[in-house]
Image (cartoon, helix red, strand yellow):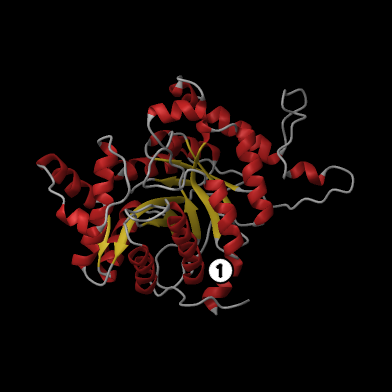
Amino acid sequence: MADEQDRRDDQRDPIRARPLGSAPVPLSVLDLATVGSGVTAAEALRTTTELARLAERRGFQRFWVAEHHSMPGVASSSPAVILAHLAAHTERIRLGSGGVMLPNHAPLVIAEQFGTLEALAPGRVDLGLGRAPGTDGATAAALRRTERLREGADDFPQQLAELTRFLDDDFPDGHRYARIHAVPGPVQGTVPGGVQSADRPSVWLLGSSGFSARLAGMLGLPFSFAHHFSAANTVPALDLYRETFRPSAVLDKPYTSIGVSAFAAEDEKEAHRQVLTGALAMIRLRTGRPGLVPTPEEAEGYEFNEIERDFINSWLANVEYGSPDQVREGLDGLIKRTGADEVKITANAHGRAARLRSYELIADAYDLPTARTEA
């Protein structure tokens, strides 16, 4: 009951939470709706829904989905659509984007989408924002309808400021957007007879380098770092965020989250067999051959050349995998090294059952609740 009371109390704070069980920090989930060989996108998205329900039942703090494009093995090209579906299949877990790539979209559109999500799931929506395209240059050009991609990234602070103004409906008088309103949103509480919830999506900045770390610190926003694919930059970026942090109406002190690839199985051999599927998919993506996540049998039978073998070794060095105790030990060590306030676990592998089982095992390793207790 104490864990359940903690969870109810923490729902009042959209960012900070107390860890449950024996976890040193709150644990969350980052999902890409991965599509494996022999699996349809519909099946992959059903697995994402199952995983969100599992995460809620076991006491994970958040469930985020990432924006990626033109990748056959990733079905999360439209986070807002997926989150709307998840809102209908969950009750209390925070739902968010990890993240929406702001330069790909008009700020007004994002404000409308996430205002709609807030109306569907009041008080539990996170808007994580990134400045990378989430895809290759040609696809980014198609998304943005321009070849000047660098311009979009450079304008990120201005785009963020505009998006925040739309979310808060507080453009100053005389601004060209002063009479434009993101709906659902605060304007509905200002018109005759209007009633509007006080909640609005919680804005996070995401990054894999120092740019967003510095910006998040200067603005006093929570910061989530992509350790799972930029591990060498994790500590420098988090240090930079903390050094530049200025208290704001959102946070009085820094709050950091890191995305971590982690996979647990009954033993280390089986865990390695599973994570090898995601590693092979990443090799193919990095070498211009994006495809579905291969089966464990395909990954085991693949003949890696020397360069690919080096990549595999480097990639897996930053994945916490093995038995539940091994994964817990690895995560505990990473939390100590980075000082992260929260960990978002991503488990990119082929099989539905193996992925769901991995999260259950990690939850068991940290003594997270085994079933939801009704309030």
Quadrant location of the C terminus in the rendered image: bottom right
Residue 343 visible here: yes
Q: Residue at x 72, y 35 (%)?
A: 170
Residue 60 visible here: no
Q: Residue at x 67, y 35 (%)?
A: 165
Foreground pick, 138 / 320: 138
Residue 341 lies, in percent from the top left, at: 43, 56
Q: Is 120 rendered above or below residue 147? A: below
Residue 145 lies, in percent from the top left, at: 51, 24
Quadrant location of the N terminus in the rendered image: bottom right
Q: Is 314 situated left or right of 68 in this image? A: left
Q: Where on the picture, by quarter, is residue 6?
A: bottom right
Q: Is 105 rendered above or below residue 77? A: above
Seen from this angle, which residue lies furthest right?
192
Seen from this angle, which residue lies furthest left?
306
Q: Residue at x 85, y 42 (%)?
A: 191
Residue 240 lies, in percent from the top left, at: 40, 39
Residue 105 lies, in percent from the top left, at: 55, 33
Q: Which residue is mark 1?
A: 7
Q: Residue at x 42, y 62 (%)?
A: 25
Q: Secondary structure at mark 1?
A: helix
